Image (cartoon, grey):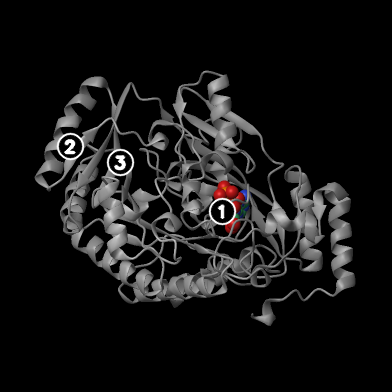
Amino acid sequence: MDRAHFPTLAPTAREQAFNALRGVVGKEHVWTDDDALRPYRQLMIAATEADHHALGAVAPADVEQLRQVLAVANRFRLPMWPVSTGRNLGYGCALPATPGQVVLDLRRMNRILDVDPVLGTALVEPGVTYHDLQTFLKQHQIPLWLDFPGPGPIVSPLGNSLERGSGVSPYGDHFGHSCGMEVMLADGSLVRTGMGGVAGSKSWQAYRYGFGPMVDGLFSQSNFGVVTKLGLWLMPEPKAHRSFAAVWPEEADLARAVDALRELRLEEVIRSPGVFVNPTLALVGRTTQHTLHPQGGCVPPEVLARAIKQHGIAAWTYLYTLYGRPEQVALDTDIVRRAIEASGGQVVPDIVDPAQVNELSLACFELLNWTGGGGLSWFSPVCPGIGSEAVKQYRLAQQIIGDHGLDFMMGAALYGRYNLNVMPMVWDRQNEDSNRRARACYGTLVRRFGEQGYGVYRTSIAFMDAAAQQYGASTAALNKRLKRALDPNGILAPGKSGIHP
Ligand code: ADP
């Protein structure tokens, strides 16, 4: 453990700081004892709680209380780790990147401030969940669809968009479909981005760029401010849609499949990333590691092959949905089928991934049942949308993950020019040896992928420095200058994305 990160506040100053926070938000919204902090200290990744120790948690009710909380943080040099719903599963949940921070829980700020059914936009606060927003839309019979990340119902559009999370429908790029923010900077000043600066703005949620430098990106995956409102673009309910599974029989079909799908994505015949999975990931929810291999540990290849055959799972499966006008969907159905068949695949109609058709589900939690041991981490490299590159990443990850005694799973989101190769690693967190292997595995993946010119699109709190390192010294230096200018006392989320005060 790196002791240098440990809280430098003397116990008396710490108590004074917490008392000051109680004065701002009320004592029922400040937590410092272990029992009360348990929900914030949940850890699924291969890391120790001490390296990400949350000193306490505080939950302001509104922007004014938030301003006063940050004033206390500045006065006492007390670092604050903002979370919206704090359920960043498999990436660190609510815990901070470095120990000794107070979780700044924004769940109480949970108003849906605006929904424009005509323009298809919304404005939400951090604590609004996808479930809340969907319930609102249904109650008001507003025909707009949402795009969800895996743990959809319980997480926030604001938190997930800031993390640049990904979904499966045409609006799968969550940050790319956000429009306009309100951000509180470390000194308590409030900024509205894009058109939000115009007094009485009529198009804050409609036009992203505003005038002059576009700064929204500075507040995503960063520690330069606390985002208090976010605008969202929502997809008009399609007039028609139809879902399919495309399957390829051989492992060696990967390159052909990715090349064929890139063309369909770039031409926007398929308008959504969908989900492209390897057979082990397709087995999740149908069986478990223990059922297949009661002796424990990862499933031997021959056992896996038998299970895959028994469950009738293909080497590669792509779940996709076509959206549009009825005639367009009918036409695209044939165009896509022909292209997939030409690449050696087959199409099975009417296989539906609920998330692609606006249905919230908690199916992604089935991953945790695979080992039942509670360990979950995602390795998520960006891959150019080229078949041979997909094969390189697949082979490299398969080898590294296998060498560390973990089952290899891959579920890619296909964006055409690039794919997000999201590889869940699951293991038994109660077992020290598997924890050690999972941690070593993740570090090796980041390093070896970096050596091949591949960076991750997002990472867990335990590997933020390692991931940032792959992006080079000049980016790190620029981030440091921005951090110094915007947060001179270093009170906001030290260590987030490898940016330290
Ligand atoms: P989820 O929606 O999955 O519950 P979180 O609330 O856990 O997402 O947020 C994920 C990460 O995004 C946090 O760890 C934090 O680094 C960042 N984040 C979340 N909300 C904010 C915010 N309002 N302002 C700044 N950063 C935020």
Badges 3 and 2: C-beta atoms under 8 Å apart?
Answer: no
Q: Is residue 332 above or below residue 178?
A: above
Q: Could you tell me the amino acid type at mark 2?
A: Val
Q: Quadrant of the C terminus?
A: bottom right
The answer to which quarter of the image holds residue 107 is top right
What separation in Å lies between label 3 and label 2 (alpha carbons)? 12 Å
Whether pointer 1 and pointer 3 mark residues with C-beta atoms closer than 8 Å, the reply is no
Q: Which residue is mark 3?
A: 319
The residue sitting at 40% across, 65% down in the picture is 298
The answer to whether 302 appears left or right of 473 in the picture is left
Instruction: Assign a secondary structure to mark 1.
Output: loop
Instruction: In the rendered view, tell whether residue 166 sits above or below residue 18.
Output: above
Q: Is residue 204 left or right of residue 301?
A: right
Amino acid beneath label 3: Leu
Q: Position of residue 136 (x, y in %)?
A: 58, 26
| C-alpha gap between disc 1 and disc 3 | 24 Å
Residue bearing mark 1: 88
